[in-house]
Image (cartoon, rainbow, N blue to C red):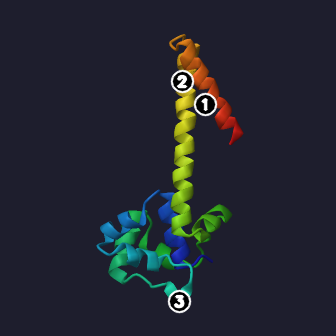
Amino acid sequence: MAELWQKLRSRRRELDITQQQVADFCSVSKGSVAQWEAKKPENRAAPRRDKLARLAEILEVPINWFHDESVELSSVSKVISDIEEDEYQVSKKEADAEERSVQVILELNNLSLMGKLTKEDIQILEALVRNAQLR
């Protein structure tokens, strides 16, 4: 059985929503959202009933989902919910940057195949590909 904090954190991340976005939507501080999602019980607080309704709306779940004891998180969701917010945001930024790099390389490669790149452009592209392979 997943605990409320795990459900909140996991679902928010699944939808790619920040704690600040949840806070703004629920008219609370980011610190309140952090407390709702706190892994350590001594740092944790439960959202009030009126806030649960807003959470259900932004997280696109029925309100009874929060208290449904049969809800289980997948093993991936459990791992993701266990990662602290600052580590998660850093990892997400790195993954996003990596994804953008791959997209640029693919676009440049397509231009190369279409004959729209100079010899210098192709050399830069080859260097980028070599650099990406070293990661």
Mark 2 and 1 residues: CB-CB less than 8 Å, in contact?
yes
The secondary element bearing badge 2 is classed as helix
Is 66 located above or below residue 128 in the figure? below
Identify residue for label 1.
128
Given the image, on which type of amino acid does mark 1 rest? Leu
Q: Residue 117 location, x and y as percent?
A: 52, 14
Given the image, on which type of amino acid does mark 3 rest? Glu
The secondary element bearing badge 3 is classed as helix
Between the C-alphas of marks 2 and 3, the distance is 51 Å
Q: Residue 51 location, x and y as percent?
A: 35, 77
Q: Tell me the tag on residue 42.
A: 3
Badge 2 or badge 3: first in the primary sequence: 3
The secondary element bearing badge 1 is classed as helix
Count residues near mark 3 (Cα–Cα under 10 Å), then give few for <14, some for 14-19, many for 20+. few
Badge 1 or badge 3: first in the primary sequence: 3
Identify residue for label 2.
108
Q: Residue 116 location, x and y as percent?
A: 50, 12
Count residues near mark 1 (Cα–Cα under 10 Å), then give few for <14, some for 14-19, many for 20+. some
Q: Quadrant of residue 124?
A: top right
